[in-house]
């Protein structure tokens, strides 16, 4: 049945990676929160790290909106559900405004998402080192393809140059919504997968407040709120969900500095169909939580904490025994490496891991098999029947001697075998999005329910 919602919303999109989208988005979120405005936040695409910064600001989960994973109807549904109750929803874009899947398509781009969700777009334009060339850049973004561009924020601009930039925006039919100067005291470091995670940033709260104070001085926040409120009603269709379990199952979810890459909507879907999520730390806890019926080991940075993971021998034994005793397990990327025999860090030092699965992992100096994948099941297994599919994303600077062969990963260009899998196991590099196949999440919990009966017997 089709429903309608009317969330106030804007999309903060950019001229390219590194243009300042995340800085401006966090500044807006913190400034609105400081004003007592209820905010929800979203990230276009599969990125885990930017939503962590959003979440630290607003104090609630930030969601990914990904058209490859979910398609138009489900994206609109997930957006409207998460935006309910917020006075403004802010969607941060990915890469450049028109950059989609592959180099030759808008599919999945920030602009594509804005068109699907009928959201006014604010372009973050990095104009450092530009004068009149900024007008040419704006003209290109305005006229390249159909869009919902409504305003522009000039990042890296000075107070003295802003009037000239604002005139360029108005001549292009865009609202000039302010400028954002360099704020070195609020800078956040990067590493091989992007920004460092929010939990690692020293004085993060102070940095976010500094960004918000800057936004109050240099951005037209009232006009941005008005723009968000100008967005019209958005129709959506509620998707079919698997039937909930009759009895809840307890899923242990690894969550600490080493394992923190999870899609909020994945966790919400598991809870909706019968999972009680119990969080634990492979770094610090001496044992798994009691009475678990399944394990979910997400991605993260195990390579940065390999020594600490190795030193927690009690946890490694507990995880190894759980897998050997046929507890249902999903292990993605970093979690997959943790289940294997060993992991070598970027300096070549090798540390023992859980030892539950064959394989030796090591860090590399380049991205391996990066990008979206359609995963085709090669046999009957926990998440999919033979021939079943689920979608995922790979983003890692490591390799292993045992990638597995339970699924055929299909990309726009090429395919390869991956994932160690079985009746109660998914362990591989691709991060999964359960909303691409909710039945896969239900199959996982179904195996957890069977394990629960065996455990109680």
Image (cartoon, grey):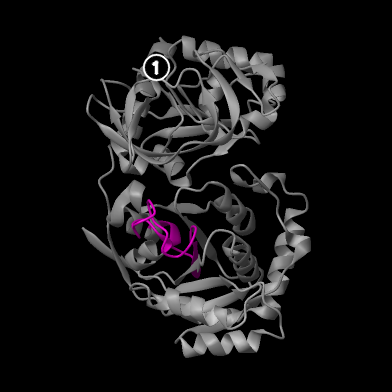
Q: Nearer the viewer, residue 219 or 248?
A: 219
Task: Give coordinates of residue 307: x percent, y percent.
Answer: 71, 22
Q: Is 369 placed left or right of 315 in the picture?
A: left
In front: 189, or 311?
189
> Residue visible at 33% across and 73% down?
146
Which residue is located at x 61 percent, y 74 percent?
127
Q: Can you tell which quarter of the image residue 33 is in?
A: bottom right
Whether residue 316 appears in this view of the structure is yes
Label 1: element kind:
helix
Q: Quadrant of the N terminus?
A: bottom left
Q: From what the image shows, is residue 207 above or below residue 197?
A: below
The percent coordinates of residue 325 (x first, y second) are 46, 10
Q: Name the residue: 56% across, 90% down.
A: 167
Secondary structure that dominates the magenta span:
loop
Above or below for 204 versus 164 = above
Q: Is residue 156 above or below residue 84?
A: below
Crowd tier of the residue under label 1, counting other residues whose Cα lies within 10 Å: few below 14, some 14–19, many 20 or above: many
* The image quarter in which residue 243 lies: top left
**Can you identify the residue that label 1 sits on?**
451
Residue 196 lies, in percent from the top left, at 66, 46
Residue 244 showing in the rendered view: no
Position of the C terminus by quadrant: top left
- Asked which quadrant contains residue 410, the reply is top left
Total numbered circles = 1
- Bounds of the magenta span? 81-110
Q: Position of residue 221 (x, y in %)?
A: 59, 79
Magenta-drawn stretch contains 242 = no
């Amino acid at each position: 049945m089709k429903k309608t919602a009317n969330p106030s919303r804007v999309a903060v999109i950019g001229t390219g990676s590194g243009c300042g989208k995340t800085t401006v988005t966090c500044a807006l979120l913190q400034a609105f929160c400081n004003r007592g405005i209820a905010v929800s936040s979203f990230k276009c695409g599969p990125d885990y790290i930017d939503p962590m910064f959003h979440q630290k600001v607003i104090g609630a989960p930030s969601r990914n909106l990904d058209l490859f994973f979910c398609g138009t109807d489900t994206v609109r549904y997930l957006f409207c559900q998460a935006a309910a109750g917020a006075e403004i929803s802010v969607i941060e874009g990915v890469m450049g405004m028109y950059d989609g899947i592959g180099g030759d398509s808008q599919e999945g781009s920030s602009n594509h998402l804005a068109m699907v969700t009928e959201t006014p777009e604010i372009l973050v334009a990095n104009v450092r080192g530009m004068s009149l060339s900024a007008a040419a850049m704006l003209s290109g973004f305005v006229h390249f393809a159909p869009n919902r561009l409504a305003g522009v924020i000039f990042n890296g601009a000075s107070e003295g140059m802003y009037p000239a930039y604002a005139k360029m925006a108005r001549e292009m039919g865009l609202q000039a919504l302010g400028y954002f100067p360099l704020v070195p005291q609020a800078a956040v470091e990067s590493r091989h997968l992007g920004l460092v995670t929010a939990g690692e940033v020293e004085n993060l709260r102070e940095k976010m407040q500094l960004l918000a104070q800057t936004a109050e001085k240099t951005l037209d926040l009232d006009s941005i709120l008005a723009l968000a409120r100008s967005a019209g009603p958005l129709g959506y269709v509620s998707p079919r969900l698997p039937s909930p379990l009759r009895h809840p199952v307890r899923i242990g979810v690894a969550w600490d500095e080493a394992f923190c890459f999870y899609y909020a909507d994945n966790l919400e879907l598991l809870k909706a169909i019968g999972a009680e999520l119990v969080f634990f730390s492979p770094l610090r806890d001496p044992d798994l939580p009691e009475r678990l019926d399944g394990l979910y080991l997400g991605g993260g940075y195990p390579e940065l904490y390999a020594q600490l993971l190795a030193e927690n021998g009690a946890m490694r034994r507990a995880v190894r025994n759980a897998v050997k005793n046929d507890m249902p397990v999903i292990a993605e990327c970093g979690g997959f490496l943790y289940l294997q025999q060993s992991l070598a860090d970027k300096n070549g030092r090798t540390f023992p891991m859980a030892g539950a699965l064959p394989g030796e992992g090591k860090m590399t100096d380049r991205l391996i098999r990066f990008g979206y994948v359609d995963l085709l099941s090669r046999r009957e297994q926990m998440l999919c029947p033979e021939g079943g599919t689920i979608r995922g994303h790979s983003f890692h600077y490591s390799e292993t001697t045992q990638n597995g062969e339970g699924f055929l990963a299909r990309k726009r260009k090429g395919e390869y075998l991956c994932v160690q899998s079985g009746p109660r196991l998914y362990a591989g590099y691709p991060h999964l999005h359960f909303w691409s196949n909710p039945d896969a999440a239900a199959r996982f919990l179904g195996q957890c329910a069977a394990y629960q009966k065996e455990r109680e017997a």
